[in-house]
Image (spheres, grey):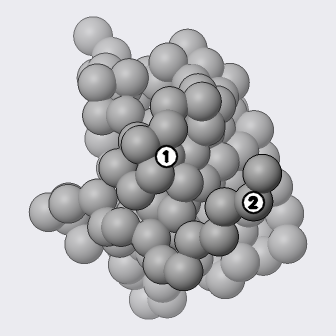
Amino acid sequence: MLQKIEHGRIFPREDGKIIDEHFGVLNTEQDSFSLAHMFAPPAWREPAQVAEFDEVVIVIQGKLHIEADDQQIVVAPGETCLVGRGTRVTYSNASENLPCEYWSFCLPAFRPERTRTPA
């Protein structure tokens, strides 16, 4: 089977971050995995979350700051990071001035209802 995606679909957000999903529930109606092209504006920061999926991020441009449990790392262009399901995580752009571009692969697929705000 081959499935070519010419363009993704944008998940609606209000914080300036763009999630351009190529494969997943929104664009291809599949739940087994998702693949999205992400664009985080300068100084962007997401609230902490706990997801019911594994997430691999691959940074293309800029730097992505990840806080998970008691660890903090910065993922630079060409680097990847795995955040395992059930991990309390906060994503942010490590730069106050430059955007961050990265890809996100989630297994199973990203769905808003598969994330929760930790207590």
Residue 52 versus residue 80 in the image, above or below: above
Marks 2 and 1 sit apart, C-alpha to C-alpha, by 15 Å
17 relative to 35, above or below: below
User: What residue does disc 2 label?
Assistant: 2
Q: In this view, does 27 lie to the left or right of 84?
A: left
Q: Is residue 105 above or below residue 67?
A: below
Residue 22 vs residue 118, the one in the foreground: 22
State which quadrant residue 80 falls in.
Answer: bottom right
Q: Is residue 51 something that shows in the picture?
A: yes
**Helix, strand or loop at disc 2?**
loop
Residue at 75% from the left image edge and 59% from the top image edge: 2
Disc 1 is placed on an element classified as loop
Q: Which amino acid does label 2 sit on?
A: Leu
Tag 2 and tag 1, C-beta contact below 8 Å: no
Give how far across and how far down residue 74 sits, in percent. Answer: 70, 58
- Left of 88 or right of it: where is 49? left
Mark 2 is surrounded, within 10 Å at the Cα level, by few (under 14), some (14 to 19) or many (20 or more) other residues, namely few
Residue 40 is situated, as x and y percent measured from the top left of the image, at 43, 72
> Does residue 96 appear left or right of residue 94 in this picture?
left
Depth check: 13 or 49 in front?
A: 13
The one nearer the camera, 40 or 32, is 32
Q: What residue type is labelled 1?
A: Gly
* Number of marks in picture: 2
Q: Mark 1 points at which residue?
A: 24
Quarter of the image for residue 100 reads: bottom right
Of callouts 2 and 1, the N-terminal one: 2
Q: Specify the quadrant that holds the C terminus.
A: top left
